Each structure stands twice: as C-alpha cells, then as structure tokens.
Image (tube, rainbow, N blue to C red):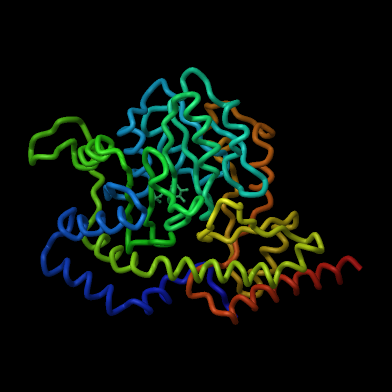
Amino acid sequence: MPVPFVDLQAQYRSIKAEVDAAIQRVLDTSAFVLGREVETFERSFAEYVGARECVGVSNGTDALHLALLACGVGPGQEVIVPANTFFATPEAVSAAGATPVFVDCDPVTYNLDAAKLEGAVTARTRAVIPVHLYGQPADLDAVGEVARRHDLVVIEDAAQAHGARYKGRRVGALARAGCFSFYPGKNLGAYGEGGAVVTNDAEVARRLRLLRDHGSEVKYRHEVVGYNSRLEGIQAAVLSVKLKHLDHWNELRRRHAERYREMLGPLEDAGALSLPREADYAEHVYHLFVVQTSARAAVQKSLSGAGVHTGIHYPVPAHLQPAYASLGHREGDFPEAERQARRVLSLPMFAELTERQLRYVAHAFEDYRAEGAAAAG
Ligand SMILES: *Cc1c(COP(=O)(O)O)cnc(C)c1O
C-alpha cells in the first residue's frame, strides 16, 4: 500500500465545493492582487493568531526578509538563527544585508538551544529568529530574556507552526513580528505561493505594507524603495476557506502523532529509534513527524520499498551549506545540528492520513527490524 508523504489531493477533495466557489468569486471580481479577498484573509488570520495586524506577502521567505527590514535590520548587523532550519531562515537574513550567526539546537525539541544563545551575541547582534521547527514552538521566554538583556529584536519564524501554542498562546504574535509561509505543503497552505507577517506593532505593519508594494501606499507615490511582494487574491480566497479547517486539521495531526507514538513506542524502548517529544510549554502541530535513527539510510530504503514515502528535514545544516562557505564554518561547529542532520527521518504526516495508513507505516518499521535481525543473526 503506497503511503504518500503528504496528500494535497485528499485535502482538496474534502473542501472542493468551498474552494471552487472562493476561486470563482475572485474570477468574477478580478481582484487578483491584494484587494478585498486579501484584506478579509489578513483580518481573519490576525484574529486567529491573536495579533493586531497581518500583512500578506508573496511567500514565507519574503515575510522574513521584509520583517527584518521593517524592524530596522540591515548591513553590518548580525542576526542569530538556529543551525537546524530550512535554508530560507538564514537566507532572509542575508537578503536583508545582515549576517546570519548560527546557534546549535536542543537535542530533544530540535529547536534553537536557548542556553547557547547568549554565547552567540556580539556587539553587532541586532536580532534573533527562533524557528518553531516541525510545528513545535521554540522556548520563547528563554529567548526573550536574552533578547531583553541585549536589546535584540525577536522575529518568530512560524512557517511550520500555524496554530501551534506556546504556554497556551498561538505563536506568531508573541514577539515583534511573526512570519508565516503558505507554501502548499504547510499546515495552512495556499494553491501557489503565499506568506504573511503578523505583528502588534503598528509602525512595523505600516513599513511592511510599504515594502511589499514598491514602497507605496498611495498609487505612484513611492516613499521608500521597496519590493513587489504582494499576496494574490486567489491565494487569499483559498486561505480563508482553509483557515476555518486549520484547528481541526491540526487536531488530526496531533492524533496521528499520538498513534505513531503508541505503535512505535516499543521500537523506541528497544533503542531502535527516538520519537519526537513535546515540550511541557508547547502544543505541537506536527507539520512534520520527525524520528531519529542511526540506521537512517537503511530504514528509509526499506520503508520506500514498502511504498512509504519519507523525507529528511534537513540533510545538511545551514552552516555547512556551500552558499555559506564564506562564513568559514566547519564540521564540529554545531555538533547537535550535525547529529540531527545525519539521523532525522520525517514520516508521512497530513490530516487525512487513515488508521490503515498509520498502521501500515508502523508495520513497515517492524518489518525493517525483523529483516535487520535476520540479517544480523
Ligand atoms: C517554508 C519555510 C520558509 C519559507 O517559506 P516559503 O513560503 O517557502 O518562502 C521559511 N522558514 C521555514 C522554517 C520554512 O519551513
């Protein structure tokens, strides 16, 4: 039985009538770029996250880039980011003209290790970007404490954590700005590219609105040199439909994670793999269900042979990417991030996973173990 890694078709089938009607509405009004659908979505998403403002942009990378600019980050400054994240996090820092400075990750939560944060602060540090990796909130209080001591701006990278809660409050609105991606495979995904920044700071929101639209608030009057990073009407209309389902979908993801834990627990007890843990302050939304195993290549091959599609997030940590060779890092600089890069394996995870599929994945793991035991013995 093939088990896909994500199944966007299954999700579309479950909301087809609503989505088709929403897209038709945009076609009928021709509000293709910004416009009413975008404003409506911005209002609903701000309310959902608990932020005063939401500014829709073209994608999650732009959300980070423009949020950094709106918070005054620029050339000559450093921005601290976790070594284990999607490349867009440090890339946005570079796009803003600043230099990414990496910090190692916590072995249990996979997130930026707040205990190591202060050691990375220099006189040039201007900001820090905690990433809520795989859907689990980073320890924002610990990050915030260091940020306050050193007068750093905190910008959340919530691209994998729509709806996740930190100490009961939704992430995104818990720092100066929170950045979201609506890439199709994210927990809240558009049918194309999309992103947003949420903030409680009216001045940051004003600057973001200028930056995303050629530095212009009034047509053909350009206050600053900006960008073209506008959210499209069709994407906003789709997102408004999907936002109504997000909590339910996240709840299903959490249930699937629990089933994986129940079924794979014995393998963890036997030392064959380790399962993701939820921090006591966190409500995880499982954008990804990431296990660790020292036999990753063999496990992945065996699962793939059984039709189970898996992923690796991410095989090379940011500090060892060729693009950042100029920063002069070498293997051993961030041992935990490097260890994770060798061991992590993401299992199929999406709201529409069935109990049969979940069981099949767990059985495929057991079969691998049985084969391994046979080969060894
Ligand atoms: C997806 C993602 C981004 C970038 O979002 P895009 O919409 O693909 O540009 C940034 N940070 C993290 C952690 C992501 O997962």
Residue 173 higher or lower than 124, as above or below: below
Which residue shows up at 27% across the image and 47% down it?
53
Left or right of residue 335: residue 310: left
Q: Is residue 323 in view from this perspective? A: no
Left or right of residue 293: residue 169: left
Residue 73 higher or lower than 60, as above or below: above
Which residue shows up at 58% across the image and 42% down it?
317
Left or right of residue 333: residue 135: left
* Quadrant position of the N terminus in the picture: bottom right
Q: Position of residue 124 (x, y in %)?
A: 46, 20
Residue nearest the observer in this picture, 119 or 17: 119
Residue nearest the observer in this picture, 366 or 217: 217
* Quadrant position of the C terminus in the picture: bottom right
Query: Where is residue 25, by image quadrant?
Result: bottom left
Q: Position of residue 234 (x, y in %)?
A: 23, 63
In the rendered image, the residue lying farthest to the right is: 377
Residue nearest the observer in this picture, 149 or 158: 149
Query: Where is residue 316, by image quadrant?
Result: top right
Left or right of residue 232: residue 315: right
Residue 48 higher or lower than 71, as above or below: below
Residue 360 higher or lower than 143, as above or below: below
Which residue shows up at 66% across the image and 72% down it?
305
Residue nearest the observer in this picture, 127 or 334: 127
Q: Position of residue 200 (x, y in %)?
A: 31, 42
Q: Position of residue 211 (x, y in %)?
A: 24, 37
In the rendered image, the residue lying farthest to the top is: 123
Which residue shows up at 46% across the image and 54% down it?
161
Q: Is residue 77 in view from this perspective? A: yes
